Image (cartoon, helix red, strand yellow):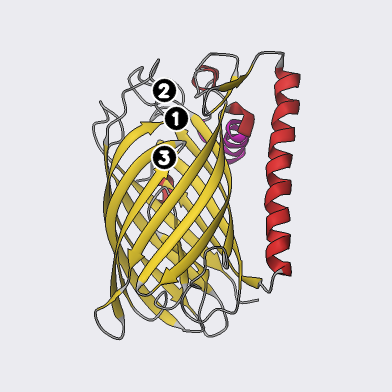
């Protein structure tokens, strides 16, 4: 990747022409992507589909180990359209559609004077469209995201302003100047799982996942759920922690406890360029646990913790990330 250029994954580059030219190009790309997605969602509503639900998950390592490093913070949100929900996804590809938007900030462990061997700062913003379906006992999710990486996302300015407002350490100019360069990364996502009922209130769901684009990897793991919540709902996997957040919900009230783990082989990552920074670790592990809650008045919440294993060579330890979602009943 060449400094001062914006690169589209696959080899197409937009050459230097000044910040104004790059900014205008980015605005056109983002607006075009949004227009395409909005058009698809409008078509979805017109084709015997209704809005079925909304999902959101906030992740931050301050909620976990109390630090501000590496997979520092992210937010994922989903809006779902489809036919009447019956407790399982429809059989046909494309009947149920999910609009997914995600933002993430990745940082070195020291925002002021990082170790030269530490990972580089990066901001990532993604827009995507996914579909969920079920054939027999097998559940499938297919989708594509357009992932924008680099200062073009303006997430570095957002974090700088937020830290300034909160009175905590802000990223130094040197850290921001060395951040991952601008790129646009079309990314494909596939997951298949199967829910195995262990009892009326407990289920185990082994799954496999593949991603190709901003990060290219293959993953295998499981999720275990104990409780009514989540048993007949559409749950959407957060790509950072692996937690599955509620997209289409049921009327159950009470608690459900969730535990999960997975391991991945990572072939390539835009967040670890070959020409600088640390070397990507091809093995990646995650271990997570959380609790879902829903009251009779419609209020609900989720709290979870995830242990992320080392992601690059020289990383001496993993990190603990907290996840949160709160929905009020009014």
Marks 3/2 in contact by CB < 8 Å: the verdict is no
- Name the residue tied to disc 3: 71
The quarter of the rendered structure image containing the C terminus is bottom right
Residue 108 sits above or below residue 47 on the image: above
Indicate which disc, 3 or 1, sits on the residue closer to the N terminus.
3
Where is residue 195 shown, x and y percent of the image? Answer: 32, 72
Marks 1/2 in contact by CB < 8 Å: the verdict is yes
Q: Is residue 100 visible?
A: yes
Q: Is residue 64 visible?
A: no
Please tell me which residue is depicted at 68% across the width and 59% down the height of the picture.
41
Please, what is the dominant secondary structure of the magenta stretch? helix
Please tell me which residue is depicted at 37% across the width and 54% down the height of the picture.
242
Residue 270: mark in rendering: 1
- Name the residue tied to disc 2: 273
Measured in 3D between alpha carbons, the distance from the residue under mark 3 to the one under mark 1, in whole angstroms, is: 14 Å
Magenta stretch: give its range: 154-169
Q: Is residue 104 left or right of residue 192?
A: right
The question of residue 293 being in magenta is answered with no
Q: Answer few, some or many: residues within 10 Å of disc 2's Cα (few below 14, many 20 plus, some between 14 and 19).
A: some
């Amino acid at each position: 990747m060449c400094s001062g250029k914006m690169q589209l994954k696959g080899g197409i580059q937009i050459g230097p022409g000044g910040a104004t030219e790059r900014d205008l190009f980015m605005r056109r790309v983002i607006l075009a992507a949004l227009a395409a997605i909005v058009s698809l969602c409008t078509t979805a509503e017109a084709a015997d589909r209704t809005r079925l639900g909304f999902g959101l998950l906030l992740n931050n390592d301050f909620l976990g180990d109390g630090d501000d490093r590496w997979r520092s913070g992210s937010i994922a949100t989903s809006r779902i359209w489809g036919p009447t929900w019956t407790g399982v996804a429809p059989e046909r590809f494309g009947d149920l559609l999910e609009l997914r938007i995600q933002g993430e900030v990745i940082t070195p462990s020291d925002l002021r004077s990082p170790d030269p061997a530490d990972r580089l700062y990066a901001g990532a913003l993604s827009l995507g469209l996914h579909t969920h379906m079920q054939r027999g006992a097998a559940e499938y999710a297919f989708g594509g995201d357009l992932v924008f990486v680099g200062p073009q996302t303006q997430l570095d300015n957002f974090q700088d302003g937020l830290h300034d407002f909160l009175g905590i350490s802000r990223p130094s100019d040197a850290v921001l100047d060395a951040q991952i360069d601008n790129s646009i990364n079309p990314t494909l996502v596939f997951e298949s799982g199967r829910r195995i009922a262990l009892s009326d209130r407990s289920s185990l769901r082994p799954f496999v996942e593949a991603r190709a684009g901003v990060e290219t990897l293959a993953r295998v793991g499981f999720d275990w759920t104990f409780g009514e919540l989540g048993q007949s709902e559409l749950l959407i996997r957060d790509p950072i922690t692996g937690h599955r957040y509620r997209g289409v919900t049921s009327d159950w009230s009470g608690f459900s406890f969730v535990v999960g783990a997975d391991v991945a082989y990572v072939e390539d990552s835009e967040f670890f360029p070959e020409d600088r920074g640390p070397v990507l670790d091809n093995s990646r592990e995650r271990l997570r646990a959380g609790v879902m809650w829903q009251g009779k008045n419609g209020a609900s919440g989720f709290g979870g913790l995830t242990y992320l294993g080392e992601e690059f060579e020289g990383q001496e330890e993993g990190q603990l990330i907290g996840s949160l979602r709160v929905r009020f009943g009014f």
